[in-house]
Image (spheres, helix red, strand yellow):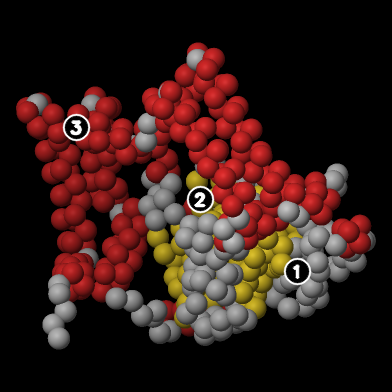
């Protein structure tokens, strides 16, 4: 890595030192002309931006941002606060190490994602997600095999111009794509790690001022190379899933007959769900109901606040004890130091104490759990699980089996869905074969292996 600094995160002199900022070199762009540098991050502990949002699951290490072993089995994100860019060039260094097998650059706007650059050990791909409000379904724009280089740094550049995108590691390793959802102002920016171990560094965001003069010619060459290169190897189930997803996307964007079939199905389904809302409430809607119920209890039950305060006090006692084992961390709470650094480093120390079986911390954790259990026992309705509410919803749905009007309308929805499937198979005759191969493959995994 260029200018990689190995710094002690807790060194007072390093915290107070003045960092020498180097102006990043312009990106090696294929499509866009780089303009103003809007954001630059080297993850130097003395200069790291306070716009990053992360906790103990990330830490500044060796001049980079590392996905730590805290919550090792969970997907985690680090996001940049208040981004806003449309036509742009994003560049970052990454190192796939440890357990990480899926690193993503995610952008979004208006409460929806609009592009996902997904990096795996042996390939990378560019995907576009769903936006139900705009009638857009997910798609994979394309993918590219890459040489696995575990533990080595690589540089990814992602360029956006209107509805076009090109992500590239080199002039031979690239993904070219085009989709209307790309043509949006990006107001969400995050890196997602499936598991611990990987690092990112040297994140740059340039404004793009135009497309290169030779882009039309370059686009043609890239498109031809992309169409003729070796595909990523996939098992039959993944192959069917990908082909079906992209078929639905193509038909949604380009086929009015298909859009009409989908619109009819969606209209019937929406009306049915509206008239029988309790039977079709989504997980998100149920979660909101639980949160609303909890808030009502907090506002009307004085004992709730007292018990909740006791839980929070016990949690602070845990943090105070962790800090007492490494008091120098308190310097990270001083003015001018991004708040996430203290949270991150305190979490690393806590994880070490937990791994070592620290008895005093365990006792404090047990006390917090005891107080939380008392709060839940006193106000169980405030902590009802989504699973419990889903069971109630399913019971309501089952009770409608004897409702003739519901059954008639539900059958109409099912038939409309079948019409969509029939049309898909009509325009893509190979879909049935892919689906059969997928089913056979999945069944083979379930079957007991013969010796």
Checking the image for residue 353, the label placed there is none
User: Is any atom of residue 59 visible in this view?
Assistant: yes
CB atoms at circles 3 and 1 under 8 Å apart? no
Res. 9 image quadrant: bottom right
369 lies left or right of 377 = right
The percent position of residue 423, horizontal first and vertical second, equals 19, 56
Secondary structure, mark 3, is helix
Secondary structure, mark 2, is strand
Q: Earlier in the sequence, mark 3 or mark 1?
A: 1
Checking the image for residue 113, the label placed there is 2
The percent position of residue 35, horizontal first and vertical second, equals 76, 62
CB atoms at circles 2 and 3 under 8 Å apart? no
304 lies above or below 146: above
Q: Looking at the image, which residue is at 60% across and 80% down?
A: 151
Q: Earlier in the sequence, mark 2 or mark 3?
A: 2
For the residue carrying disc 1, how many other residues have a C-alpha within 10 Å: few (<14), some (14-19), or many (20+)? Answer: many
Q: Nearer the viewer, mark 1 or mark 2?
A: 1
The percent position of residue 216, horizontal first and vertical second, equals 58, 73
Q: Nearer the viewer, mark 2 or mark 3?
A: 3
Nearest the camera: 62 or 77? 62
Q: Looking at the image, which residue is at 52% across and 70% down?
A: 100
Q: Earlier in the sequence, mark 1 or mark 2?
A: 1
In space, the residues marked 2 and 3 are separated at their CA atoms by 34 Å
For the residue carrying disc 2, how many other residues have a C-alpha within 10 Å: few (<14), some (14-19), or many (20+)? Answer: many
Q: Looking at the image, which residue is at 43% across and 43% down?
A: 134
397 lies above or below 176: above
Secondary structure, mark 1, is loop
Checking the image for residue 63, the label placed there is 1
Q: Looking at the image, which residue is at 15% across and 86% down?
A: 451
User: Is any atom of residue 341 visible in this view?
Assistant: no
Residue on which the image places disc 3:
395
């Amino acid at each position: 890595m260029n200018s990689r600094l190995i710094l002690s995160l807790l060194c007072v002199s390093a915290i107070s030192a003045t960092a020498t900022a180097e102006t990043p070199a312009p990106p090696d762009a294929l499509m866009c002309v780089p303009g103003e540098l809007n954001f630059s991050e080297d993850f130097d502990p003395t200069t790291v931006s306070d716009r990053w949002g992360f906790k103990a699951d990330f830490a500044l290490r060796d001049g980079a941002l590392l996905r730590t072993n805290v919550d090792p089995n969970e997907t985690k994100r680090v996001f940049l606060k208040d981004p806003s860019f449309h036509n742009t060039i994003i560049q970052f260094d990454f190192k796939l190490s440890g357990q990480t097998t899926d690193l993503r650059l995610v952008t979004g706007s208006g409460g929806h994602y609009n592009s996902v650059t997904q990096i795996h050990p042996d390939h990378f791909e560019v995907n576009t997600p769903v936006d139900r409000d705009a009638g857009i379904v997910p798609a994979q724009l394309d993918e590219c095999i890459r040489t696995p280089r575990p533990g080595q740094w690589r540089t990814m550049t992602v360029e956006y111009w209107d509805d076009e995108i090109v992500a590239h590691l080199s002039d031979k390793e690239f993904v070219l794509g085009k989709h209307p959802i790309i043509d949006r102002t990006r107001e969400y920016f995050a890196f997602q790690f499936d598991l611990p171990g990987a690092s990112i560094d040297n994140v740059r965001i340039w404004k793009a001022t135009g497309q290169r003069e030779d882009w039309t010619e370059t686009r043609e060459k890239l498109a031809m190379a992309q169409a003729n290169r070796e595909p990523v190897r996939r098992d039959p189930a993944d192959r069917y899933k990908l082909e079906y997803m992209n078929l639905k996307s193509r038909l949604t964007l380009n086929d009015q007959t298909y859009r009409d079939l989908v619109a009819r199905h969606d209209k019937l389904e929406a009306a049915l769900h509206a008239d029988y809302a309790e039977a079709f409430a989504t997980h998100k809607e149920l979660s909101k109901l639980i949160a609303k119920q909890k808030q009502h209890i907090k506002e009307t039950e004085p004992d709730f606040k007292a018990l909740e305060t006791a839980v929070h006090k016990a949690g602070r006692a845990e943090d105070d004890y962790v800090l007492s084992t490494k008091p120098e961390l308190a310097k990270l709470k001083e003015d001018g130091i991004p708040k996430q650094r203290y949270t991150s480093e305190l979490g690393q120390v806590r994880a070490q104490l937990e791994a070592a079986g620290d008895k005093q911390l365990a006792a404090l954790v047990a006390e917090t759990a005891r107080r939380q259990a008392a709060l839940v026992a006193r106000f169980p309705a405030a902590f009802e699980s989504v699973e419990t509410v889903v069971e109630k919803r399913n019971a309501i749905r089952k009770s409608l089996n004897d409702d003739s009007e519901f059954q008639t309308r539900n059958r109409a929805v099912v038939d409309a869905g079948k019409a969509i499937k029939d049309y898909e198979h009509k325009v893509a005759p190979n879909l049935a074969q892919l689906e059969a191969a997928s089913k056979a493959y999945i069944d083979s995994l379930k079957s007991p292996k013969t010796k």
